[in-house]
Amino acid sequence: MVRPNPGDDNPLWQYFCNNQKRLIYKWHHYFDIYHNHFSRFRGLPIKVLEIGVAHGGSLQMWKNYFGEQAYIYGIDIDPRCKQLEEERVEVFIGSQTDREFLNYVKNKIGIVDIIIDDGGHTMEQQICTFEELYSAVQKTGVYLVEDLHTSYWSEYGGGYKKEGSFIEYAKNFIDQINAWYTQEQGLTPSNLTKTCTGIHFYDSVLVLEKYSNHHIPKASMTGKFSF
């Protein structure tokens, strides 16, 4: 369930409402999305990469939420963000449209459990980042892109039904995750077909849940026939 305003049962929402540390700016309904998909990682030795650091408040929030074994990485184009590093928080300075830089970060930190793209929100940035970093998420991890409403805003390169917007780009994922069943030669199983078992579209957010899926899914029957 995703609520317009989460309740006190959501620890991320509690942290946000009581935050006196660095600035966090989030849409309220995001917090249930985060908790629904991230709660299984709490207390584990995980690595999280967030694109878009700003004032560093969300890096602190993730560090608190995931616990003492989590290591949090950030990417931002603003060199001032480097000073926001602290214990178990490391920041890389560069552009998310610089594929060489993204691959440098990927090689530097290795496979991560969660990627959160809250960067510049342009179509080029979101697509480039996905193309370069989806492979950096471990085989049971989560890739999340937020603020997808920019896909409808011309100043970000978007527009309703506009070819090249991230929303239009991501709609192809629906075909890819179902590619095992196609009878058309134009659609064949892709890397996403074989590595993703869940695609969740929310208001302004896309979540991809990874899981190894290299074979056609199985169907079975149990019980007795009624007729």
Image (spheres, grey):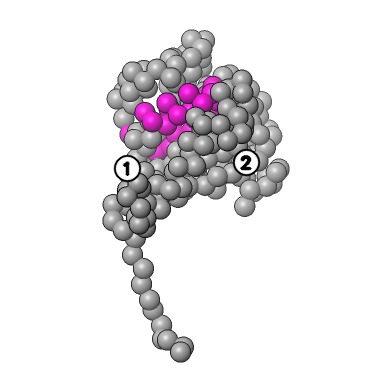
Disc 2 target residue: 203
Q: Residue at x 35, y 48 (%)?
A: 187
- Callout 2 secondary element: loop
Tell me which residue sits at (33%, 65%) in the image. 218
**Kind of residue indicated by mark 1:** Asn
Residue farthest to the right, as pictured: 5
- Out of 120 and 45, give the one closest to the viewer: 120
Q: Residue 116 or 165: which is nearer the viewer?
A: 165
| Number of other residues with Cα within 10 Å of mark 2, as a class: few under 14, some 14 to 19, many 20 or more | few
Which mark is on residue 191?
Answer: 1
Tell me: residue 41, above or below residue 92: below
Q: Amino acid at mark 2?
A: Asp
**Residue 172 x %, y %:** 45, 42
- Residue 191 in the magenta stretch? The answer is no
* Magenta span: 111-132
Q: Is residue 178 left or right of residue 20?
A: left
